[in-house]
Image (tube, coloured by chain):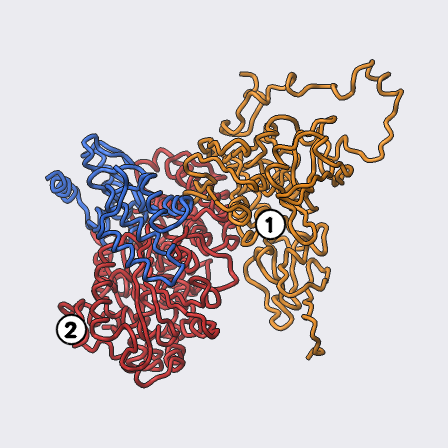
Chain colours: A red, B orange, C blue
Amino acid sequence: MGRKLLLEKAHVENIRLYEVYRREGGYRSVEKALKSMSPDQVTDEVKKSGLRGRGGAGFPTGMKWGFLAKPAGVPRYLVVNADESEPGTFKDRYLMEFIPHLLIEGMITSSYALGSNNSYIYIRGEYAWIVDILEQAIAEARQHGWLGKNILGSGFDCEIHVQRGAGAYICGEETALLESLEGKRGNPRIKPPFPAVKGLWDCPTVVNNVETITAVVPILNDGGEEYAKIGIGKSTGTKLISACGNINKPGVYEIDMTISVEEFIYSDEYCGGIPNGRKLKACIPGGSSVPILPANLLLKTAKGETRMMTYESLADGGFTSGSMMGSGGFIVLDDRQCVVRHTYTLARFYRHESCGQCSPCREGTGWMEKILWNIETGKGKMSDIDLLWDIQRKIEGNTICPLGDAAAWPVAAAIRHFRDEFEWHVNFPQEAQTRNFGLAHYADALELTV
Amino acid sequence: MAEQTNKPANLKVTIDNITVDVAPGTTILQAARQIGGDVTPPAMCFYSKLEGSGGKCRTCLVEVAAGSAADPRSMPKLVASCRTPIADGMVVKNITSDRVQEARAGVVEFLLVNHPLDCPVCDQAGECHLQDLGYEHGKEGTRYEFNRRTFEPEDIGPYIQLHMNRCILCYRCTYVADQLTDNRVHGVLDRGDHANISTHISKAIDNNFCGNMIDVCPVGALTDKTFRFKNRVWFTKPMEAHRDCDQCCGKVTIWQRGEDVLRVTARKDEWGEVQSFDGKPGWICNTCRFEKKKASDWVIEGPTKVNRHSVISQGHYVGLKKPTETLPAVMDGRDPKLLMDIHTVSDVNKIELSELPGPATSENFKK
Amino acid sequence: MPVQFSDTTLAEVKKLVARYPDGKHKSALLPVLHLAQDEFGGWLSLETLDYVASVLNLSPIEVYEVATFYSMYNLKPVGKNVFEVCQTGPCMLNGSDEIIAYIREKLGIGPGQTTADGLFTLKTVECLGACGYAPMMQMGKHYREHLTREKVDQIIAESRK
C-alpha cells in the first residue's frame, strides 16, 4: 500500500462534518502555522517539500509563492482553481466532495503564508452541489474560529468565498479564471504581467489548484523535508490520479509516485486491469491534453526501462515517445477503441472550449475537428493526415494561452503513434464504418509481469 | 556598472541584426517600427493609440534569440512583439527567422480560412490590411475545403456597415467604444469560432466618435455606410483637409472624385494608424466624417502622400504632366477614364461571394 | 409581467456583492446570472439580461458578452427537465454515443431540441468532470452517472411524474 496523505481520512464516516474532521486531526496545520511560524517560514516549508502544481503544469509551488509581489498597502489574493475541466480529470471534485475541510484548512494556512485576507475558490459551474458542501464547511470553520478576524489571536484575518463559474474549460487557465472571477468573459490575459504582480483586480495574486493547496496541510503537519522524502527525484509527495476509460475500477487514487504504470493499471489496488478480458491499446496518462501513448510505449520507455508514475518517467522520451503527468487524468483505451474517433471527440472538445480570442486557436481547432470528422466518417483523404499534422504544428506554441498546445498535442500524438489507423480509415472507408481497427501491433512488445 | 545618470537609461535591442536604443517600456514592435522597413512585423490587432489592444492576432510573432544581456537565454516560444517589452541587450529575429516566417504564414492561413475573400465587392479593398498581409506573408491557394463560417447580417445604424463575415476579431472597435465613447453598446459575443462583433439586439451604434471604429478596423468588417458601394478607393483622390471643429481636431483626409467628397476619414500614419497631432491621436467626430461631404466644407491643404506600393497610388500622381495630344489620338477621341465601366461589364457584384462554398470560378458567374 | 427578483433573491444578490471589494461588484455577474436563470424559468431572456444589468449597475452589453460566453446559460427557453449528456472522450469510450442515441429514440428529439410537451430538452455537452462515472449527464443541480438504458428509462419515468 502506498502512502496516503490526502485521502487517508476521506472515507471516515461523516468526515465532511467539522467535528469529525477536527477529531481526526484536522486544522492542526493552521494552529502550527499561525501560532509558531511566520508567513515566510510556511512558504519555506512548501519550498522544501518540492511540491509541484497539481493542476497540470507541474510548476514548483514554493517558487510560485516566492514570486508574489508584496507592495505595501495593496491587498494580495489567493485564488484556488477548482475549475477542473480537463477531460479525464475528476480528482479535485473528489477532494471537495468528500473531505472539504482539507481544502479549507489548506487555504487558511496558504492564505496566511501569502498574506491573503480574502481568498476565493473558483469552482466550475457544473459542480453546483459541491458549492453547497464547501459553503457548509466554510460556515463551520468560521463558527469555530478558523476564519474571520484575528484567527487564534494571531492578528491574521481571513475570509474564504466560493465563486461559481458557468461552463468554460478555458477558465481553468489562471488568467482566464481571474477574468471570469472579475465578472468578465473568460479570455486569457496576455502575459506579462503575470498574476503574481498583477492578478485579481490588478493586485498580486497566486492561483493554485485544489490538490496543490490541500497538499499544504500534510507538508505543514509533517514538515517539508518529510514530504520531500516521498516519491522519486523531483516527483515528491503523493499525487491524485483520476483513472477512467476501459478499466475495471475507475476512480480517484492517491499514489506516492514510486509505482510503475503497469502496476497502476493492472494491480487490484488501483485500476484493476482491463475489463472483459480485453487488451490494453493505448492510454492518455495525464488528462486529454497530453500525448496519447500506445501500450508498448506506455509500460516501457523507448529505452526499455519500466515507465513509472512520476513526472520525469511519464515525460521520458519527450513528445517523440513520452507523455506527461499533466493533471493526472488517466484515460485507458482497450483494443475495441478507435483512436481516430477518440481524437475527434477531443478535437471537438477543444473547438467548443476555445475562447476565440487568438487566431490560431479560434480557426485551427475547428478546422482540425472538421478534418477528423471526415476521416472518421470515411470521407478523408490521405493528404488530410499531413494537413492535420501541419495545422496542429502551426497552432502549437503560437497562441496566447496553453489551450492551443492542449488542442494540438492530442492530434499530434495520435498521428505520431497511430498513423496506420488513420490511413486505414482513408483506405477502407466502408470497412471503417462497420468495425474498428483493433489492436494491430501496438501492444506487440507487451509482456505482463503483474 | 554603468555610469550613474539622472536620465532614464536607454535599452539596447537588436532586431534582425540592426541595433537601436529605445526608451524603457518600449515593446519589440515599437522598437522595430523605430527601425522601420521590412524588419517591422505586421500588426492586425495592436493599435498604439488604443490601450489594452494587441496580442490576439499573432501576426507579429517574433523569435527572442536572447532575452537580455543579463540573461541571454532565448525564449522557447515565439512571442507577440506588440506586447513584449524590451529588456536591455535583447536579440530579436523577425525576417531572419524561418520559424517566424512559417508561423506567420500559418497565422495568415488561419485568418483567411473563414474569410469570405469577397474583395471584389468589399469597400475595404485597396486599403485592407488583411489583403496586404496575405500578399506579403501568405501562401498561394488555400487548403481549406469546408463551408466558410457565416453570420446573420446585423444592422447597427445609419453610419456603420457591419459585415461580420469579414471580421478577424481584433477587438479594436470595442476599445474605441470603451475609450472614445461614453456608452459602449457593442462587444464580442459568443465564443470560440462563433465569437462575433454585435450589439446583440441590433441596436444602432450612435455616438459622436463611433465613426472611428471604421478607421481602426483592419478589414472590411466595419465600413462607412455613407460611402458604401460609391466607388473603389483607388479611383478616389485622397486630400489632406481641415476645418474648425469644436468636437475634434478637424484634421482629416477627404477622398474625392472630381470635386465630390465621397468619404472623410481620419489621417493615417505609415502604420495605418490615426495620426497624432500635438501628441494627441487625431480621432475625428461623426459630424466631420459623415456630415461634411462638400468640398466647400473643407480647407484643402493638398494631396495625401500615398505609398507607391499602394494600389491607391494608381492615377494619383503628384506633379504629373499629362500628355495633351497623344492620348485622344490613340483613344479615338474617347475619355480615357471610361475605358471600361466595371458595373456594366462585370457580373461580380451580383454574386454573393461569401456564400460560395469554395473559391469562385467562372461557373459561378455563368448562372 | 416585468422581470423582478424576489426579496430573498435580492438579499442574496446583496450578499454576493459584499464578497468583493468596493467597486468590484461586476464580479457578482456570473453568480447573479445563475440566480436569474434559476428564478426565471431556466433560461435568460433579453428582459432578464437587461434586468440583471440594472440590478448590478452594468451596461447591458457587458451582461450580453458574459451571458453568451458561458455554456451553462440558456439563451432560449428549455424544457422542464434538461438532459445534458456528456459526449467527450472518456464518456465516449464508455458508450455515451449509445446513450445519446437511446435518449433521442425515447424522446423523439435531437440534441438542442425540446419535446412538444415542454417536458424535456436534450443537450450534448463537453466534459463535465465525471469521467470515472461515465457515461453520465447533468440534470439541474445534480449529476446522473453510470447511465444505462434502464437507468435512462427510470429517469424519464421519474421526470414525467
Relative to B175, does residue A267 appear above or below in the rendering? below
Q: Quadrant of the N terminus of chain A?
A: bottom left
Marks 2 and 1 share the same chain: no
Q: Position of residue A155 (x, y in %)?
A: 33, 80
Identify the subunit bearing mark 1.
Answer: B
A139 to the left or right of A229: left
Q: Residue furthest bottom?
A: A36
Q: Amino acid at mark 2?
A: Glu
Q: Residue at x 59, y 53 (%)?
A: B61
Checking the image for residue B38, the label placed there is none
Q: Please give the residue where the numbered disc 2 appears in the rendered image.
A: A19
Tell me if mark 1 has few (under 14), some (14-19) or many (20+) residues whose alpha carbon lies within 10 angstroms of its own: many
Q: Nearer the viewer, residue B126 or C36?
A: C36
Q: Nearer the viewer, residue B259 or B57?
A: B259
Q: Amino acid at mark 1?
A: Tyr
> Could you say which quadrant of the image residue A236 lies in?
bottom left
Q: Quadrant of the C terminus of chain A?
A: bottom left
> Could you say which quadrant of the image residue A322 lies in?
bottom left
Q: Position of residue B354 (x, y in %)?
A: 52, 29
Q: Is residue C130 visible?
A: no
Q: Residue furthest top?
A: B332
Identify the subunit bearing mark 2.
Answer: A
Tell me if mark 2 has few (under 14), some (14-19) or many (20+) residues whose alpha carbon lies within 10 angstroms of its own: few
SS of the residue at dot 1? loop
SS of the residue at dot 2? helix
Q: Position of residue A437 (x, y in %)?
A: 34, 43
Q: Nearer the viewer, residue C21 or B102?
A: C21
Q: Nearer the viewer, residue C81 or B99?
A: C81
A13 to the left or right of A392: left
Q: Please give the residue where the numbered disc 1 appears in the rendered image.
A: B47
Q: Position of residue C113 (x, y in %)?
A: 27, 34
